[in-house]
Amino acid sequence: MNKIRRILALFAALLLIVGIGSPINAEGDGSTSTTATTETKYKLRVENEDATTDGRGYEYYAFQMLKGDLSKSGNEWVLSNVQWGDDVKQVAIDKLYAKIKNDDGSNITSAAEFARWMQKQKENNNTGVFHDILNMMGVSDGSSLEEGKKMTWYSEGSGESAKYGYEVSVTPGYYLVRNTAVPTGKTNSDFIVQIVGEDVTVQTKNAVPSSNKSTADINDSNNLIDSGQEVTKTADYDIGDTIPFTLTATLPEDYDKYTKYKLVFIDDICSGLTWDRSATIYFGSSDTVGQSITFGETTDASIYGGTVYKYEISDLKASTSAITIPTTLKPLDVITVKYNAVLNSNAVINSIGNRNSYHIEFSNNPIVEGSTTVTPDDVNIIFTYKLIFNKTDDNGASLKGADFKLEKFINDKQGPASEKIDDINYIGTWTDVTALHTGESVSNPSKATTNDGSTFTFSGLDDGYYRLTETTTPAGYNTIDPIKFQVVATHDGKEIKSLSGTDQSGTISMTPTISNTDASLTASIKNEKGVVLPITGGIGTTVFYVVGGLLVGVAAVLLISKNRISN
């Protein structure tokens, strides 16, 4: 920022900041009860609750803009015999003398005349005087202020009553406190103008916007939003599902003090999510229609191995050729961006989840045009799970030769199936999980079988209501009845808190595994051998026939032999 703007901003602040400094009285009239002498030094403090330790990145300077004989009547300070302050350079004074006119059309020629002119602007409620002065003066020379006095960090008290900030000892006068540096993510305080004729503590006027990214956690088996997850940082979905995301940017309390305001939406999408960059933007709560926008793909490095996308509004106070920005935007209004992304086959299945983050870049100094900073990353996590089924015999040993189909109940309200889930009847369709998105150009949950054919893994699944059907039964074993069970997951906006599978018939028991490498439920599916029953017409009758035949043969031989002997 060049220095001429700083002094001009001071003068505007003298008019615009109510309750911080009293109006200038260039004539010095009115009864007085207190006088501040030029020899005495007073403590000027800027209280900043965020500056809990020194070195936080804040920096403040105090500049004496006007001085003279300072006296106080009641709560009002009066400055008489006005002179320019010690921190104002002559080049700035000369410019003011040449540009600003008295009521009679003559140029001002003294600090007292300038003080009267400023007081007149306040009486006329000229809230645009700052811009008037800028237009008159220009901002090209950059040499209007001296170094000023750097304020030092202080702390006072402890616990909840502790106070922190910056302070400096100064002689009486009108002072401008300029916030010259702030930590990343913070906004510069507007200029603070204060009369110092005694120890004074003033508050900073930092106003930081906020940003938020959320989704909704929808259970498609009952078509309900999971309890407490209407707007959430974490959700679970099937691979191939379309996920709604919402980005918000809440304007700061001092938004109306900016002549230009830059706002950039920055979305870091992990490789497990697919997004076509199209979105809808809404300006304020009354905007229910929105406007279509397209994010740009950047070369910025993604934290999560995906892609960073941006949508930039270079000046929120001016419409662009692409979108119309309402002029009615005001402090604390919320700008919302909504879009849909798809969970794809790159999705990770573990407790870490598919992380994506969002922040905004925003103007952070109402005086310095082009100065920006960013909000902290707001992380959003999408989880998906595995269901693992181990085929065993009635002794618990692995059993080969089976095959299974896993279906999910989708509440489409059309049928043909009717299922009672949590004592409520739902109409829907049983759909093979590997074909949940048939006809769509997206992935589906996958099925994998181990080499020995005894373990079946279904990956990329949401919570919901499922049915496991044995489609091929090992020889000599009975086919199991279809097993219906419900997968229930909870998460708290940061991590998975629980994962469980509930079989209503009590046929199976599901064991959860939640780790950095896994998020699954495992169950054993037991087959029983077929029953061997007694039968007739078997080998026993055949023996009788054979033995009987042999006896008949022996009898015939004996009879023939006896006849020969007799003859």
Image: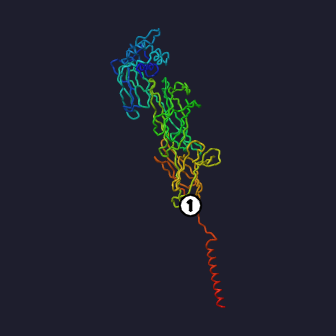
Is residue 101 something that shows in the picture? yes
Count the marks.
1
Nearer-the-camera pick, 218 or 152: 218
Q: Quadrant of the image for the N terminus? A: top left
At label 1, the amino acid type is Glu
Figure quadrant of residue 77: top left
Figure quadrant of residue 80: top left
Check the image and name the residue furthest to the bottom. Answer: 567
Query: Left of 492 or right of it: where is 484?
Result: right
- According to the picture, the residue beneath numbered tag 1 turns out to be 528
Q: Secondary structure at mark 1?
A: loop
Query: Left of 244 or right of it: where is 172?
Result: left
Is residue 29 something that shows in the picture? no
Crowd tier of the residue under label 1, counting other residues whose Cα lies within 10 Å: few below 14, some 14–19, many 20 or above: some
Nearer-the-camera pick, 220 or 567: 567
**Could you tell me residue 536's position as x and y percent?**
64, 70
Q: Quadrant of the image for the C terminus? A: bottom right
Q: Say which residue appears at 65% left-offset and 46% top-offset.
A: 415
Relative to 323, residue 347 above or below: below
**Could you tell me residue 5's position as x and y percent?**
43, 20
**Could you tell me residue 402's position as x and y percent?**
56, 56
Nearer-the-camera pick, 143 or 28: 143
- Colour option used: rainbow
**Could you tell me residue 359's position as x and y percent?**
48, 34
